Image (cartoon, rainbow, N blue to C red):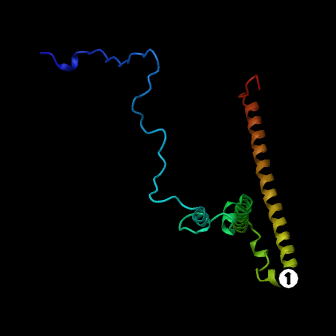
Amino acid sequence: LRHSSTTTNPPPKPRVLAKPDRFNPPSHPSRLRTRPPPKYYGPALTPEELAAQKTKKYPHMMPPEGTFMYWFLTNRSIHVYITIGILVTLTGGIWLTEFLRTTPYRAMLPPNSLLWEHPITFLRQWWDVFEMHVAYTTAQTAERRRLKTEDVRKRAEYRKAHGLEEAGE
């Protein structure tokens, strides 16, 4: 008794097509190369009707050329100013919320009502609190760096004291 799994069949050979002598373009392309122009039944439009079509407002289409809306929608510089303005506003809002969330000096900030009563005093107090926040953040960063360099120095001393340092170092 012999099971079918014990026989080993040779792997199937891949199909190889014969190489043509020259390039033979397909007789039926996947789509026509040139589309026929659309057929409009009836007489041809007069120049007055064509001019009226250019100024007429159709739904869901661009406004006609020469109008303010066409200029506004196609002017790149206006879109650049709008985009940059939105991005700067979003960045400022994110920076402000992050500053208010992380500063330990939030209680020292002036009340918002002071902005309309005394704007210069309001901005001066904000600037002083911001400078204090920057000094605090700088001190924290310097302390973290000092601790890391001290840790590296202690590790090097430990390796030297216990003979773990390699000769090449």
Residue 168 location (% of width, % of height): 76, 23
Residue that badge 1 annotates: 118
Question: For the residue carrying disc 1, how many other residues have a C-alpha within 10 Å: few (<14), some (14-19), or many (20+)?
Answer: few
On the image, which quarter does residue 133 sit in?
Answer: bottom right
Instruction: Please report the residue visible at 84 percent of the width from the left and 79 percent of the height from the top.
Output: 119
Give the position of the N terminus as an image quadrant.
Answer: top left
Instruction: Please report the residue visible at 72 percent of the width from the left and 59 percent of the height from the top.
Output: 80
SS of the residue under disc 1: loop
Q: Work out whether 87 lies above or below 17.
A: below
Instruction: Please report the residue visible at 52 percent of the width from the left and 58 percent of the height from the top.
Output: 44
On the image, which quarter does residue 132 sit in?
Answer: bottom right
Q: What's under tag 1, amino acid-wise?
A: His
Give the position of the C terminus as an image quadrant.
Answer: top right
Q: Work out whether 107 lies above or below 53.
A: below
Q: Is residue 105 left or right of 19 when viewed as pictured?
A: right
Residue 65 location (% of width, % of height): 66, 63
Residues 133 and 156: in front is: 133
Residues 46 and 121: in front is: 46
| Residue reaching furthest to the bottom | 117
Residues 5 and 82: in front is: 82
Q: Is residue 77 left or right of 135 when viewed as pictured?
A: left
Q: Is residue 127 left or right of 70 when viewed as pictured?
A: right
Instruction: Please report the residue visible at 73 percent of the width from the left and 67 percent of the height from the top.
Output: 96
